[in-house]
Amino acid sequence: MFAKKSLGQNFLMHRQTGERIVLAADLPKEAVVLEIGPGTGMLTRELLKRTARVVAVEADYSLIPQLEETFAEEIAEGKLQLISADIRAFSAEIIGSDYHVVANIPYYITGELIRQFLTEKHQPKSMTLLVQKEVAVRIARSKKESLLSLSVKVYGTPSYCFTVPRGAFMPAPNVDSAVLSIKGISRSSFTNPTQEQQFFACIRAAFAHKRKRLAKNLEELWGREEILSSLTKCGIPIDARAEDLSLSDWLSVSKTLS
């Protein structure tokens, strides 16, 4: 079984790591899990031991026959559903129930997949992802906020679970990985879709030019007087930079800007 560079494949080879990922997900026995890219089935096997049902979506059609053979019993029992598809074209609504995402995802689409599921109409209850260590640190541990960290925190609570050395994969990536958990996923930060859109318009503009002050970046969408009035109302210094504001600051600013 050969990993395809074009799909960003790095197969998880250590059973103990798969077990630790599932334990970090802290799933109830009745949980339905969406696994992205089962690969060799290392993580799939551990998920099947501890949850009610797994829906595994694999973009590499050449891996499907081996997975069907390996998990023939679980497929026959209805515990495992294998879907050959690109996860980016997948709608979670077909799961038909509450679900949790647990996956070893390709580095090159990490941000895209996190955004896809956090903004899904049918959001997961939680996400437990094996990602590049640097990304997990930026989202869950950095003292400075980023467009990515705020985009996660506005929907749920991220935490850095543990580091996974590059040697746990085949082929070994050039960097270490980490397990990132996002719990309590919801849209409770927003009272309506317009407010949600306004928040993202605000932070995208604010982080567009890192060297510029926050107020200057926001001038792409709002007038200077309106921006300064909003910052003053929210108790934010007018010379602040985007990375210095907390999630609660950003929610306040985005709500006061019309």
Image (tube, helix red, strand yellow):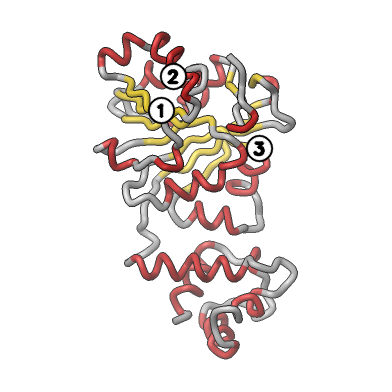
Amino acid type, mark 2? Ile
Q: Where is residue 8 in the image (x, y as percent from the top left)?
A: 61, 32
Q: Nearer the viewer, mark 1 or mark 3?
A: 1
**Residue at 39%, 46% in the rendered image:** 184
- Circle 1 residue: 84
Left or right of 224 in this view: 189: left
Q: Which of marks 2 and 3 is in front?
A: 2
**Residue at 56%, 42% in the rendered image:** 110
Amino acid type, mark 1? Ser
Q: Dot 3: within a 10 Å radius of its alpha carbon, few (fewer than 14), some, or many (20 or more) residues?
A: some
Q: In this view, does 57 lie above or below 226?
A: above
- Circle 3 residue: 133
Marks 2/1 in contact by CB < 8 Å: the verdict is: yes
**Residue at 51%, 56% in the rendered image:** 151
Of 114 and 87, nearer the camera is 87
Q: Residue 64 carries which label?
A: 2
Q: In this view, does 229 lie above or below 14?
A: below
